[in-house]
Each structure stands twice: as structure tokens, then as C-alpha cells.
């Protein structure tokens, strides 16, 4: 406990004091004397016992503990114990986040006490009243966020360890020899954490599934799904149940529905889509208005509450769209067949039908169950060709079939008119303060082995906006219809952005000459739209688009309607994609129940379901992002010898992140490996500055890089810095 000069180390004193305090804090209803504390700490020498007596008196003078009897001490119960969640950093430290606190609390590594990322914990907060940065210590783990982890197994003679690629998982997992299962050394495995003994450095676990060899395509895709606890196949009993469903169209069921089979109807979807859950119908009325139907697959007709199929769909809550596959919410017999609005087939649908005038105003509306017949299936590219050329002939290079064909004049005219109306609706939304997030999507050309052979970018065009506007209309009007009745419903809500995040965004975009107007809510929205328009086609577009989206709150599901900031709607729900989203199924069920005269359902029950759906949506989004990163790394493996132009997309004290212009792949150039000077991080300029040349590397600068390392398991790219553009 002492240095060479005989004086105690301040750090050791502090740690010793905390150890003593922790013993008392773990059992706040019990008192301890110095002998009991010494026994717990396994100290039996006189010097250590004297140190304990001294520290007990110091803690009592600081009013952290109290002497309730001679030599007996008990912790003073304070409001400094707070419950919340751990947010790990990649440096083995963490922050404690709680709705009861204004600011996050720093948790040093030695104060984590076996807590892991996103665990629900109880924390004691130090220095709260002393004007210093508060620190915390985990005193109790209330609930583990997850107990299953993906990693690579290293098998020794009598035991094994599993190391994960997750930078926030600061420990490996110890696997006893009798719990290895079928794992071989070097396999990627899924392990379950079973115990973490008090004196063990690592938790103990068991291998529950072998995923394959690192770097193999299916191994890595399955590892992504397993990391987020997402399934990649259906249980046999669920598949069997789905196969036995009656998917025929029956006359007696048609009689209970509005028959719209003779109304002109078609679908517009991505070229490679397998499920079509929405269709549009069009009819010009005698009064000059237009009747436009938004027809959605009637999933709730087949997905009955209380069945094992419904339980599985609720558990999944969403389909997961990875780069090379879809993990559907519903078995294929429903998602790709019975519920898919395929061309030239009769289908059961749930519809929102609107009478709309030339100004795109809704003058009448109807909601209910229908039966439709789709006359035509379009890919977005085909619909876009009709809009751009006004032609009824689709050339071979655009058509789905690869052959030239001609559509009817009725379908051509319907497409053109609905495009006109959609543009008016979009202009109105923007004028009302909606924000136009048309972020470029990275897509891959894949060969038969799912290897990436090329990268392309998907951008929204008029045909995409046509579908978007009518889906938004249906979602908004359904939510409004129920909301104004003051009945429990499933809303899609989006809070106003946090001002601190907008200020942080302003700091970054000012380096490119852009700004946000903070004078009012409407001016913030207007300036964000101007920003997103101004960056289109420029080198910084993807960076600014990404940062702007991150500055927004996350949309989520809730029974508490607060409106949707990003869309500028007072009422909004999800009604249009029940094949792939469970909240849409809930919306369908509630809408029909209320149309039938039902009373408002229990709000608390649906709020729990909304929270689950939001959580699963976030997990799916994380898995989708990881699959894109994996495919980007895989693509770059074959381009190691090429020189790429990139844009600096991030600057940190350990290096710069560079996003390649031609394919949006992002990697790091480490500061110690930039050879043309010795660089240091300038926090004020958010830049690296060369000490000799005073050269500056900052956000938005164009630089040339080469791939140094591509790690498929960690999904990370390291670049070699070549030079700044123009040098």
C-alpha cells in the first residue's frame, strides 16, 4: 500500500476506500466493524486493519457512512443510488444513462463490476455535489441486456475462450471443456453466458451453436443475425401450421367485402421484389374527381390472434433485409404467395379509398376490407419510364421481362395522373415543414455465390415518390380517423430534434459553408431541407445526409400520439406493410375492430407491444447495417491494389475516417501511419494538423487512399493514406 518513500499512493488509498464502501453499500441494512471488513477483504495484518479503521473514520466524516454503535458502521442511504443503463465505449469504460439524470455519468473500467453494454444496473454516483465531473460505480446488475454472444473460439487443452468482434464487449468468455459442443478450434460460435463467479476475470459460458469458419459468407451472415438474436429460419411447427392455412379465395368471404376486382389496379415495386403488399387503384369519377384506392394485403385475415403463427410473427415483429437475403416476418406461403398482391390474381385486401380533386385534396374517404384483382405489375424503372416519356410502350432494356411490351392507355393515364397528384401532395408536405430525407442507398451486384461484383446507388425518383405519397396518405388518414375518436391506437411517432444535436450538426456543416436557422421550428425544418438539397451531388452529400439523419430523434411506435416531426403530420401510423411489419397488423386489427363498433382497447397492453416492435426494428436495422459493412469489406478485398479518391468523414485523436466516393465504403487511416508529417488532433478545428508542414486534414477534404487491411470478421477497413487531393 505504499511507495518507496513510505507515503501511501493516492490512487491506492482511493481504491481501498471504495472497496470498503462497496462492502457496506452491498448490504445497506447491515452494520460492519473493522474485523468483519478485514475478513471480507482477506486481510489479517495489523497495518491493513489500522488502514481500515482510518478509512472508516474518513468515510464517516464525509457522511457517506455512519457509526451507529461503537466501531460499527452502516452506509448512509442517499439519493445517489440511481437505476439506469450502461453505455459501453470501445475503451473499456462506460457511461451511465438514466431518465432520472440530466447528464450521463462516467463509469471507469474498475467500477463496472461485471456490468456489460446496455445492462440495467444500479449505480452509486460520486462527486455529485462538489462541482466536479460525477463518476459512478455499479453496485448491482438488475438485468442483463443479453446473455448470448457471437465470437471465435480458441480451444486449449482443458478449456476454451471465445473472443467477440464487438468492440463494446470488453471480456472474453471462458468455456469449460465439457461445454464445447461440436466446436472446433477457430470456429465462429454462439455462446450463452451462464455465470460470472465473484473472483473470475471472465464469465463462464457454453457453446450453443456452431456457425462455421470465419470469413465464409454464410458463417458471417448467420453471425450477424445471431449477434442481434434474430432468427434465420422458422420453427417446424410454425411452418407446418402456415402450410395448412386455407389460402383459397371464397365467394362467401367476397360477399363480406367491398368488391373492387373490376377497378383498374396495379403494383409498383423494386425489380427484385418477391412480396407485393400494396397496390393502387384508379378511377375517374363523373364529377371530375378521382377515386384512388390504396390496397394493402389483408394479413390479419390469415394471421389470427393466439395462434403459434401469430406468436412467431409478434416475436420477430419485422422482416430483416440483409444484402443477400430477406429474413421474413411471415413464412413464404403467406409473404410470397397468399398475401402477395401478384398480377392477374384475386386477393383479399384492407383498403383506404379516397376521393381526391385536382388540387390533391381529399374530399371523401372510406376504410374497410376489400377484394381486388391486380391488372399489372410494374418495377419502379418501368413506371419511371412511363412518367418521363409518357409512352405506353416499355422498351426491353427497362422492362422486367427483358422484352418490349405495351400497356393499356388506361394504365398509362392513371400512372401519369397519380404522379401529378403525388407531386402536389409532396409540395404541400414540404410547405408544412416536412423534411426530405432522400439518402443515397448503397446496393450491390451479386453473383450466384452472393459475392459482390459491383456497387451501385439507389436514388428515389418520381416513381418512388408516387408510391411514397399515397402510402403516407393512407397511413396518415387511418391514424387521423382513429385518433380523432380518442381511442387507443398504434401510432408511428417522431419527436422534435434535440437542440444540442442540431448545434453539433451546425458545427460540422459550417465547415462546408452551410448553416441551420434556429429562430423557429419552421425555419429549422426549412433550413434542413435547403441543406439536404444544396448538398445533392456534392462530395460531402453522404456525410451531411448521414449526420442530418443522426441529429434527428428515432421514430418509434407508441399509443401516445405526439405527431411525426419529420413528416410534419399531427397523426401518423403504419398501415401499409403488414407482410413485413407487425405494427401494421395491429393497426389493421384495431381499425376493423373500431369500424365494427368496438370500445377502446387497453392502452397499456398495446404500449408494451409497441415498445417490443420498436426494439426489434432497431435490432433489424443494426443487422442490416452490419450486412452492408460486411459486403463492403468483402468487395474491397478484391480491390487492394487500387487507388481510391475519398472524403474525410470523421476526425479523431487516433486518425481519420475516409469514405470512398465511388462506392461509399468507409475505413480508417491511423494517425501514426500518415507518413508525410507528424500529426496531432486539434479539437477546436476538428482536424489533424501537421507539426512541420502545418498541413490540415479536416472533414470534407478529398484524399487518396489504398486498402491496407480488410477484416471480414470485424467488418472493418483500414486504409493507407496516400495524399491529399491537389498535392
Image (cartoon, grey):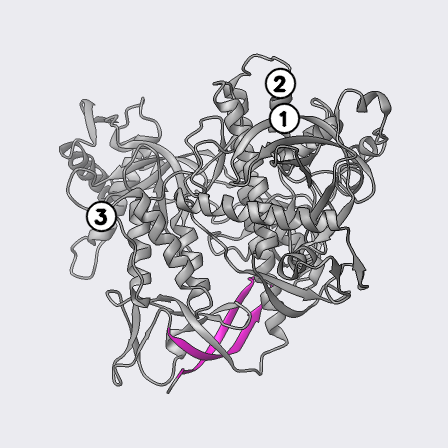
Quarter containing the C terminus = bottom left
Image coordinates of residue 203 in percent, x first then y, are 52, 45
Q: Which mark identifies residue 137? A: none
Question: Mark 3, mark 2: which one is toward the viewer?
Answer: 2
Examine the image and state in which quarter residue 301 appears.
top right
Which residue was labeled with disc 2? 595
Is 160 placed left or right of 482 in the picture?
Answer: right
Q: Is residue 706 magenta?
A: yes
Q: Classify 438 as above or below 553.
A: below
Q: Which mark identifies residue 367? A: 1
Packing grade of label 1 (10 A; few <14, some 14-19, many >=20) is some
Image coordinates of residue 211 in percent, x first then y, are 70, 53
At x 62% / y 18%, what residue is drawn?
595
Q: Is residue 713 visible?
A: no
Q: CB of mark 3 within 8 Å of CB of mark 1?
A: no
Q: Is residue 587 magenta?
A: no
Which region is colored magenta? 701-725
Q: Earlier in the sequence, mark 2 or mark 1?
A: 1
Packing grade of label 3 (10 A; few <14, some 14-19, many >=20) is some
In three-dimensional space, the C-alpha distance between marks 2 and 1, rounded to whole angstroms, equals 8 Å
Is 482 placed left or right of 321 in the picture?
Answer: left
At x 63% / y 51%, what residue is drawn?
416
Examine the image and state in which quarter residue 682 appears.
bottom left
Magenta segment's dominant SS is strand
Image coordinates of residue 259 in percent, x first then y, are 77, 28
What is the tally of numbered marks visible in this picture? Answer: 3
Label 2: which secondary element: helix
Which residue was labeled with disc 3? 13
In three-dimensional space, the C-alpha distance between marks 3 and 2, rounded to whole angstroms, equals 70 Å
Amino acid at each position: 500500500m505504499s511507495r518507496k518513500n513510505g507515503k501511501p499512493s493516492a490512487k491506492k488509498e482511493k481504491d481501498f476506500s471504495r472497496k470498503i464502501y462497496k462492502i457496506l453499500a452491498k448490504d445497506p441494512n447491515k452494520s460492519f466493524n473493522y474485523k468483519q471488513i478485514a475478513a471480507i477483504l482477506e486481510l489479517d495484518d495489523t497495518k491493513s486493519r489500522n488502514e481500515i479503521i482510518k478509512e472508516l473514520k474518513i468515510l464517516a466524516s464525509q457522511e457517506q457512512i455512519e457509526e451507529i454503535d461503537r466501531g460499527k458502521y452502516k452506509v448512509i442511504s442517499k439519493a445517489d443510488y440511481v437505476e439506469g443503463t450502461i453505455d459501453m465505449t470501445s475503451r473499456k469504460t462506460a457511461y451511465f444513462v438514466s431518465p432520472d439524470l440530466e447528464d450521463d455519468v462516467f463509469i471507469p473500467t474498475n467500477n463496472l463490476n461485471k456490468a456489460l453494454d446496455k445492462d440495467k444496473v444500479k449505480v452509486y454516483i460520486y462527486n455529485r455535489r462538489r462541482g466536479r465531473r460525477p463518476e459512478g460505480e455499479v453496485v448491482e446488475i438488475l438485468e442483463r441486456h443479453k446473455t448470448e454472444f457471437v465470437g471465435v473460439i480458441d480451444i486449449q487443452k482443458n478449456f476454451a475462450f471465445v473472443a467477440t468482434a464487438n468492440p463494446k464487449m470488453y471480456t472474453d468468455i471462458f468455456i469449460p471443456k465439457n461445454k464445447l459442443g461440436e466446436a472446433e478450434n477457430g470456429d465462429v460460435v454462439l455462446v450463452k453466458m451462464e455465470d460470472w463467479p465473484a473472483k473470475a476475470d471472465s464469465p463462464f459460458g457454453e457453446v450453443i451453436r456452431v456457425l462455421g469458419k470465419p470469413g465464409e459468407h454464410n458463417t458471417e451472415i448467420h453471425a450477424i443475425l445471431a449477434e442481434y438474436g434474430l432468427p434465420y429460419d422458422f420453427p417446424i411447427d410454425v411452418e407446418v401450421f402456415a402450410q395448412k392455412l386455407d389460402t383459397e379465395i371464397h365467394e362467401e368471404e367476397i360477399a363480406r367485402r367491398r368488391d373492387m376486382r373490376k377497378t383498374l389496379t396495379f403494383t409498383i415495386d423494386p425489380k427484385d421484389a418477391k412480396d407485393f403488399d400494396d397496390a393502387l387503384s384508379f378511377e375517374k369519377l363523373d364529377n371530375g374527381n378521382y377515386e384512388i384506392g390504396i390496397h394493402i394485403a389483408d394479413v390479419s385475415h390469415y394471421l389470427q390472434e393466439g395462434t403459434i403463427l401469430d406468436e412467431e410473427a409478434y416475436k420477430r415483429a419485422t422482416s430483416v433485409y440483409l444484402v443477400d437475403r430477406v429474413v421474413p416476418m411471415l413464412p413464404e406461403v403467406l409473404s410470397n404467395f397468399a398475401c402477395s398482391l401478384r398480377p392477374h390474381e384475386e386477393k383479399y385486401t384492407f383498403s383506404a379509398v379516397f376521393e381526391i380533386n385536382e388540387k390533391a385534396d381529399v374530399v371523401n374517404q372510406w376504410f374497410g376490407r376489400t377484394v381486388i384483382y391486380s391488372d399489372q405489375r410494374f418495377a419502379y424503372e418501368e413506371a419511371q419510364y412511363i412518367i418521363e416519356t409518357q409512352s405506353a410502350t416499355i422498351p426491353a432494356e427497362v422492362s422486367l421481362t427483358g422484352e418490349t411490351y405495351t400497356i393499356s392507355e388506361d394504365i398509362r393515364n392513371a400512372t401519369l395522373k397519380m404522379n401529378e397528384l403525388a407531386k402536389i401532395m409532396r409540395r404541400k408536405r414540404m410547405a408544412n415543414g416536412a423534411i426530405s430525407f432522400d439518402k443515397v442507398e448503397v446496393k450491390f451486384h451479386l453473383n450466384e455465390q452472393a459475392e459482390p461484383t459491383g456497387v451501385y446507388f439507389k436514388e428515389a425518383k418520381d416513381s418512388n415518390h408516387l408510391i411514397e405519397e399515397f402510402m403516407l396518405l393512407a397511413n396518415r388518414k387511418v391514424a387521423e380517423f382513429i385518433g380523432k375518436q380518442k381511442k387507443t391506437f398504434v401510432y408511428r411517432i417522431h419527436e422534435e430534434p434535440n437542440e444540442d444535436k442540431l448545434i453539433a450538426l451546425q458545427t460540422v456543416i459550417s465547415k462546408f459553408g452551410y448553416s441551420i436557422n434556429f429562430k423557429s421550428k419552421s425555419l429549422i425544418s426549412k433550413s434542413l431541407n435547403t441543406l439536404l438539397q444544396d448538398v445533392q451531388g456534392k462530395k460531402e452529400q453522404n456525410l451531411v445526409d448521414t449526420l442530418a439523419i443522426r441529429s434527428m430523434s428515432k421514430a418509434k411506435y407508441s399509443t401516445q400520439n405526439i405527431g411525426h416531426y419529420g413528416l410534419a403530420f399531427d397523426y401518423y401510423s403504419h398501415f401499409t406493410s403488414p407482410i413485413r411489419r407487425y405494427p401494421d397488423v395491429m393497426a389493421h386489427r384495431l381499425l376493423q375492430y373500431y369500424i365494427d363498433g368496438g370500445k377502446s382497447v387497453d392502452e397499456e397492453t398495446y404500449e408494451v407491444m409497441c415498445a417490443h416492435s420498436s426494439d426489434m426494428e432497431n435490432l433489424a436495422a443494426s443487422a442490416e447495417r452490419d450486412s452492408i459493412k460486411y459486403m463492403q469489406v468483402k468487395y474491397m478485398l478484391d480491390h487492394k491494389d487500387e487507388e481510391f479518391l475519398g472524403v474525410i468523414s470523421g476526425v479523431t485523436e487516433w486518425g481519420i475516417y475516409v469514405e470512398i466516393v465511388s462506392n461509399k465504403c468507409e475505413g480508417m487511416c491511423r494517425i501514426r501511419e500518415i507518413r508525410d508529417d507528424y500529426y496531432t488532433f486539434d479539437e477546436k478545428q476538428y482536424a489533424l494538423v501537421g507539426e512541420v508542414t502545418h498541413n490540415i486534414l479536416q472533414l470534407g477534404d478529398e484524399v487518396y487512399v489504398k486498402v491496407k487491411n480488410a477484416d471480414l470478421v470485424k467488418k472493418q477497413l483500414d486504409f493507407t493514406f496516400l495524399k491529399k487531393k491537389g498535392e
